[in-house]
Structure formats: C-alpha cells, structure tokens
Image: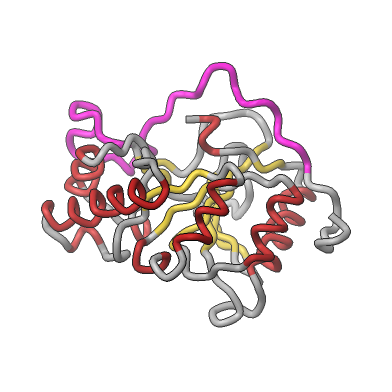
Amino acid sequence: AKRWKLDKVPLTAPAPPAKKPEIEAREGFEVDGQEEDGLPPVFTTVPTKEKVVFLTIDDGAEKDPAFLRMMSELKIPYTVFLTDEEIKDDYGYFKKMQARGITLNNHTLSHPYLPGLSYEDQKREICGMQDVMEKHYGKRPVLFRPPYGNYNRDTLRAAKSCGIRYAPIWSEEVYVDHWEYREWDQDLHPGDIVLTHFRGEDDWDGTMTDMVRRFLDRITADGYAVARLEDYL
C-alpha cells in the first residue's frame, strides 16, 4: 500500500457467499418479455448486506503495465468488459490479465449505440465479440455490458442468443479526478457496481494507477472492500 501511495491498506472482502444472491433486472430497467423470455437482467447493484463493491473496467484502450502490477500486488479483484476495436492492437496485454485470474467479458466489437441498430446488427456486434474472445482467450463470456449502458429488447435477445446470462451496468463511475453517482444520495451502497475505463494521460489528468488510488482511498475510508463480481453471480 505504501509503494502505491495509498492512504490505508485496502480492506479484504469476505468469503464469497455460499448461496448466490438472486439477480434480477433493476426496477425500471426491464424490457418487454424480460422474465417470460429469460432475458439477461440489467442491474446496477448486487443484492448483499456485505460492505463490498465491485470494480469493473471497460473497453481496453489504455494498456498500462503499472496497472497490472498494482492490482496484482494489492490483490484487488476486478472485472473487465472489452471492445475488439480497442484491444486488437495488443491482445497479449489482456492475456496477462487473464493469467492473473481476471475474467474478460464482452463489450461488443466496435462500441456502437446498440438501440440504433437492427436486431441482426446488434447480434453481429455481440456474437462477433464472443468469437473474438473465444479465439484469443479460450472462453465465450457470460457477462456483457452494452456500450454507454444503452440497450433495448433486441439487445438482450441478441445477447441471450450469443450465450450471455447477465448484463451488469453500474451505480457509480470513478475517474482519475472525481466520482459520478447514479443515486440521489451520491453515496456508496453494499453491492454497488463501480465503472471505470482503460484510460491514461491522453484522456485523463493522470494514469490508471492514479485512478485506482482514488478509488481505493475512497472506498477504504468508507469501510468497503472490493469483491469479485463473478463470485456473486
């Protein structure tokens, strides 16, 4: 923690739940036929009373070796959602991440606004990324995050047809210099999913390690630990 200039040592998450919580679509985030068709639920928080949050990182544009070292040394779990357009210049970076136990998930081929596309085009974006993930990382993900958090019924139908079971979005977003909140109270809650992006000094006033430091200092001060999202699904 001192090496990475954290205020305090990050808290350790409790053991994964013996019984996984039931994941349902967040109220107001359902689509027609959500339950009848067994469509992947869109959710922002995992039902738990434990003081844990889940760190998720999108796209794959920045490939910072220091970030890999920091997260490994601090033993911080996280979940990534990758876009082929952003990772195809260095698939190997995320192979190293996968070797450290990180789950790699689907964020489409090219990060389009999916509700503006036909069902077939949405399916091509999602299933095409499943093919990329299987080719380079040996697995077809079961988690999918729609770009910008935007989706419609066709999105979830297409995702299900491609083998997707869950469509987590987020409650908070952390940047290198500030946080943004979905809820009115502008605060953290047990089970919240936190979003950030693979970004560096070209886009931010700082690095990915600076962002992680801001994230960890905030949640640790509030008594939260980082848990592994997949352990609750």
**Percent position of residue 45, x then y:** 50, 40
Residue at the image position 25 percent from the left and 43 percent from the top: 159
As displayed, is residue 105 above or below residue 116? above
Q: Which residue is at the far top?
A: 19
Asked which colour scheme the image uses, the reply is secondary structure
Q: Is residue 132 magenta?
A: no
> Toward which corner of the image does residue 86 lie, by quadrant?
bottom left
Residue at the image position 72 percent from the left and 42 percent from the top: 224
Residue at the image position 23 percent from the left and 41 percent from the top: 162
Principal SS element in the magenta part? loop
Q: Is residue 16 left or right of residue 98?
A: right
The quarter of the rendered structure image containing the N terminus is bottom right
Q: Is residue 24 left or right of residue 224?
A: left
Q: Is residue 129 left or right of residue 158?
A: right
**Percent position of residue 196, x then y:** 54, 60
As displayed, is residue 97 above or below residue 230? below
**Percent position of residue 166, x then y:** 37, 38
Give the magenta range.
11-40
| Residue 184 can be seen in this image | no
Q: How many marks?
A: 0
Residue at the image position 54 percent from the left and 79 percent from the top: 203
Q: Nearer the viewer, residue 109 or 18?
A: 109
| Residue 56 can be seen in this image | yes
Q: Which residue is at the far bottom?
A: 202
> Toward which corner of the image does residue 101 lie, by quadrant?
top right
**Percent position of residue 144, x then y:** 36, 46
Q: Nearer the viewer, residue 190 or 211?
A: 211
As displayed, is residue 203 above or below residue 192? below
